[in-house]
Amino acid sequence: FSLIGDVGVYFSNAFAVTPLCCPSRSSILTGKYPHNHEVRNNSLSGNCSSPAWQRGPEASAFPVYLNKQLYQTFYAGKYLNQYGTKGSGGVSRVPPGWDQWHALVGNSQYYNYTLSVNGKEEKHGDSYDKDYLTDLIVNRSIQFLDERSPQRPFFIMLAPPAPHSPYVAAPQYQNSFSNVKAPRDGSFNKPGGKDKHWLLRQPVNPMANSSIEFLDNAFRKRWQALLSVDDLVERLVKKLEDVKELNNTYIFFTSDHGYHTGQFSLPIDKRQLYEFDIRVPLMVRGPGIKPNQTLQAPVLNIDLGPTFLDIAGVNMSQVNMDGQSFLPQMVSAPSLRNGTSRPYFLVEYTGEGCTNSNPDCPKMGPGVSQCFPNCVCEDAFNNTYACVRTLTGYNLQYCEFADTESFVEVYNLTADPHQLENIVKKVDPVLLQTMNQRLIRLQSCVGRSCRDTKNEKLRSEF
Ligand SMILES: *[C@@H]1O[C@H](CO)[C@@H](O)[C@H](O)[C@H]1NC(C)=O
Ligand SMILES: *[C@@H]1O[C@H](CO)[C@@H](O)[C@H](O)[C@H]1NC(C)=O
Ligand SMILES: *[C@@H]1O[C@H](CO)[C@@H](O)[C@H](O)[C@H]1NC(C)=O
Ligand SMILES: *[C@@H]1O[C@H](CO)[C@@H](O)[C@H](O)[C@H]1NC(C)=O
Ligand SMILES: *[C@@H]1O[C@H](CO)[C@@H](O)[C@H](O)[C@H]1NC(C)=O
Ligand SMILES: *[C@@H]1O[C@H](CO)[C@@H](O)[C@H](O)[C@H]1NC(C)=O
Ligand SMILES: *[C@@H]1O[C@H](CO)[C@@H](O)[C@H](O)[C@H]1NC(C)=O
């Protein structure tokens, strides 16, 4: 906060359009909703770093445009969960648009991982000084800043897996926050209740003590792992200052999705439609951005690409993205910001499951996944949903499930910020109809039609 948010803007309503790593990262890279990049889950078969993704969406992701603007581009860290695997073209394949490439093979690790360094395999062990991935990522970026050509602009993307599991803290932080526990507020250890979709009716409530211990431990370790991310930010800012680029560089800090620890008695994960999983942190500093601002206009992960390209001076009429640049909101006077924010947007998710029953949790049957601890399953094939979220006028969420119940959940987030009560049976059917129409429209939107969301007056109250 002190190095980015306090000297720039903090977005209090930043969202991921889908709460899972690979689809969300694909949205960040392409500026598109999942229905347009077609990356559905973290598997190759769901298009995570698949050949179809490489031929299609990845070929027009934002780094390609930056490179055409003669930006020097640098990537270090976790890319897409299947990156570097055999089916994804192996480590020798470097995605287009990146001049310097230091990407993790596969999913999150802190030690004992393999990198693709500009297409060459580089194996790492578990020596803190040589291998700790969060530190290595910032070290490589510092080296890049020394070696780049000072005549051309640069773009650096650092993607530490932290605080993703296995959340291994640096040795100096392994005893930090020893008394910290997950927050007990909101929907913590509350039942999902009968008015939520079936997956949320499964968790045991109250949670087993061992589940609570498990999630508190995860929460603490995630904070510990984040201390190295704080160090990363500090070292990068310091380096930019040393090379006299700090006042000429935009710095963005964000994440690919939220996370829950005990909400609605779900021990740990993401993947749910609720605020705790779809909200992300977002702070930006840079030239022309006044310090100490909080902006409430909703911004999405699909807006990051358009914003980067806007900063780089790319002609946006030639770019086919669903999101929109939020640069004008950051650099203009507050009085000029009216009308620049979208009245509503889409969140869409395709559930992950396992075809076979989990032998450890036979009672749950096939179709579910992420069943730990104590056989509480966090995802299922039919945890597949799409939501319209409105913030302007009404603070409302409307979601439809693609399950056998065609389940609908509706929340009034002003009256019920923790989404304890599904009000679908209480609201005027006209309102439901309007939201359903918005949803259908957004689910097939492309480019401009995703941004042209008129704020028709909702005719009913709820
Ligand atoms: C993967 O993407 C391709 C096009 O890029 C699409 O034809 C295919 O249906 C997608 N697969 C899934 C599972 O969505
Ligand atoms: C890394 O791998 C080595 C050799 O397999 C193993 O002994 C060590 O425990 C691993 N370290 C971590 C942090 O997983
Ligand atoms: C990163 O650089 C610092 C400072 O030069 C060094 O002490 C540390 O060992 C390096 N860590 C890794 C993982 O490269
Ligand atoms: C669970 O923890 C609570 C509070 O710490 C305690 O009162 C209760 O006896 C514990 N239950 C079991 C089964 O250990
Ligand atoms: C950044 O600071 C340097 C002096 O350190 C100054 O010459 C330059 O004009 C500044 N650039 C911007 C964009 O403010
Ligand atoms: C931001 O605001 C806080 C408190 O409102 C103040 O202490 C701080 O100096 C301000 N920072 C900047 C960079 O203006
Ligand atoms: C990912 O999506 C593909 C295509 O829809 C599907 O076949 C596969 O089972 C999904 N993977 C998981 C883990 O759900």
Image (spheres, helix red, strand yellow):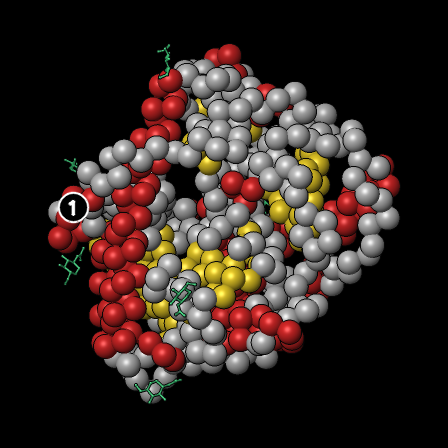
Task: Please tell me which residue lies in front, 99 or 91.
Answer: 99
Residue at left 85%, top 44%? 460
One can see residue 386 in this view: no
Estimate the x, y position of residue 294 in percent, counting from the top left: 52, 62
Q: Residue at the spot x=28%, y=45% of the render?
A: 225
Is residue 241 placed above or below 25 in the rendered structure?
below
Q: Quadrant of residue 98?
A: bottom left
Q: Quadrant of the N terminus?
A: bottom left
- For image coordinates 59% across by 21% down, the residue present is 201
Provide residue 214's location: percent of width, then percent of height: 34, 26
Q: Which residue is mark 1?
A: 172
Q: Residue at x 26, y 52 (%)?
A: 228
Image quadrant occupied by the C terminus: top right
Foreground pick, 2 / 168 = 2
Q: Write down the quadrant of residue 117 in the picture.
A: bottom left
Decide if residue 291 is on the left or right side of residue 380. left
